[in-house]
Image: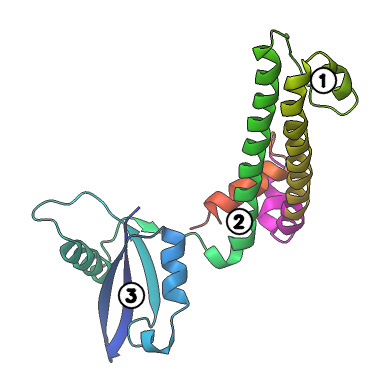
Amino acid sequence: MRCSAATCGTPTPGRSASSPLDLPLSPAWTYILLSDQKPAWTYYVRDEIVVAGMTESRGQKSDRRDAYGLAEKLRTGALAKRIFKAPREFSALRELSRMHITMVREVVRVQARIKSLYRSRGIPVAGLSVYGARHREEWQQRLPASARLRAAPLYSQLDFLVEQTKQIERDLLREAKKHPIVRILETAPGFRPIRSASLVSTSGLLVR
């Protein structure tokens, strides 16, 4: 996603100026990049940082024209679409939520491979018992000896991913407790802790 970040400063009393930067980064990373400026940036980044999404424009196209067009809209108060995700406040929650989603997908992927292994040998399989440790040995006895060599590492991988997912869930819930908005969302029907934390990590504070 391409964003334009306009930074406002006040080089002369009573008059503001806008310096446009066109960066091919995500909105959150653009904001972090401009917020964590080194001393050399202080001339350019002064009072306000605004990350604006690119909207439809007419006429000749160029990064320079787009950036300065957004800066002019910012200066005159005509900027309609601002992108801001409060990356500092929810950065840890956001990263944990993304990792949780990734791990859940990996668990589902390995589970699908295990079932596919049985079905490829003509063994009907349904439900969740094929994954559990209690009936695992019984299920593997139905496979030919050569296929068991493939099943063993798949089950080991599944056990590792499940344990890692549980750990990430604990970390995510621990981090979610630091944000009152998550507890408020949990009072809504259908919003459990994980879903509430994921929503906040994606949208940030809904007051913006």
Which residue was labeled with disc 2?
95
How far apart in space, not on screen, are marks 1 and 2 (Cα)?
37 Å
Magenta: main secondary structure equals helix
**2 or 3: mark nearer the eye:** 2
| Residue 26 location, quadrant | bottom left
In primary-sequence order, the first of circles 1 and 2 is 2
**Outermost residue, left direction?**
59
Looking at the image, residue 6 sits to the left or right of residue 198; the answer is left
Label annotation for residue 140? 1
Q: Tell me if I can see residue 11 in this picture.
A: yes
Looking at the image, residue 55 sits to the left or right of residue 135; the answer is left
Which residue was labeled with disc 3?
7
Q: Nearer the viewer, residue 98 or 105?
A: 105
The amino acid at mark 2 is: Glu
How far apart in space, not on screen, are marks 2 and 3 (Cα)?
27 Å
Looking at the image, residue 100 sits to the left or right of residue 47; the answer is right
Task: Please provide the residue range marked out in magenta.
Answer: 172-188
Q: Nearer the viewer, residue 56 or 79?
A: 56
- Label 2 sits on a secondary structure element that is helix
Residue 152 in magenta?
Answer: no
Q: Position of residue 180 (x, y in %)?
A: 70, 58
How far apart in space, not on screen, are marks 3 and 1 (Cα)?
62 Å
Residue 187 in magenta?
Answer: yes
In primary-sequence order, the first of circles 2 and 3 is 3
